[in-house]
Image: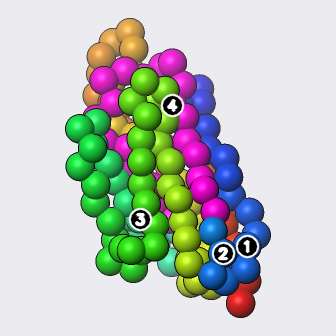
């Protein structure tokens, strides 16, 4: 089953902007933390930003002041507005959510399929 659906990746020049979107499917409820992670070629996956259902945000130092995470709880969606992009931001960006299965209420952590962001110099 597909738990998270991402969109918005693409190719952009350095200094440009992109907005990523991620929507949770109806298989999840009581979603607490949602966030974005990224994985560059040859590197480990790293945290970019997270946001709780109450709106508490956390950012990696490398993106502070350039990226903004937001959330629409009614739509079970999370967004990442990326500005002043740098070539080192090039990576596959993954959406992440921690919540409960709709029928069993088992707590789970789920991932999206990833969306590629390429920043050219």
Residue at label 3?
48
> Is residue 55 in sight in this rendering?
yes
Left/right placement of residue 94 relative to residue 104 reads right
* Quarter that holds the C terminus: bottom right
Query: Crowdedness of circle 2 by 10 Å Cα count: few (<14), some, many (20+)?
Result: some
Quadrant in the rendering for residue 71? top left
Q: CA distance from mark 4 to mark 3?
A: 18 Å
Please state which of residues 23 and 19 is positioned toward the viewer in this rendering. 19
Q: Is residue 39 above or below residue 26?
A: below
Image point (51%, 78%), residue name: 43
Left/right placement of residue 35 relative to residue 54 reads right
* Quarter that holds the N terminus: top right
The magenta stretch spans residue 21: yes
Residue 30 in the image: x percent, y percent? 30, 23
SS class, disc 3 = strand
Residue at label 2?
16
Residue at label 4?
24
Q: Nearer the viewer, mark 3 or mark 2?
A: 2
Is there a contact, CB below 8 Å, between mark 1 and mark 2?
yes
Sooner in the amino-acid sequence: mark 3 or mark 1: 1
Residue at label 1?
12
Q: Nearer the viewer, mark 3 or mark 1?
A: 1
Residue 72 in the image: x percent, y percent? 43, 34
């Amino acid at each position: 089953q597909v738990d998270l659906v991402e969109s918005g990746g693409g190719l952009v020049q350095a200094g440009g902007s992109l907005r990523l979107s991620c929507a949770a499917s109806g298989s999840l409820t009581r979603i607490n933390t949602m966030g974005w992670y990224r994985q560059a070629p040859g590197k480990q996956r790293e945290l970019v930003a997270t946001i709780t259902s109450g709106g508490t945000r956390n950012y990696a130092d490398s993106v502070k002041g350039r990226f903004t995470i937001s959330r629409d709880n009614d739509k079970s969606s999370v967004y990442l507005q990326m500005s002043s992009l740098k070539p080192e931001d090039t990576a596959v960006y993954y959406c992440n959510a921690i919540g409960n299965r709709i029928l069993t209420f088992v707590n789970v952590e789920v991932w999206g399929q990833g969306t590629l962001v390429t920043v050219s110099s």
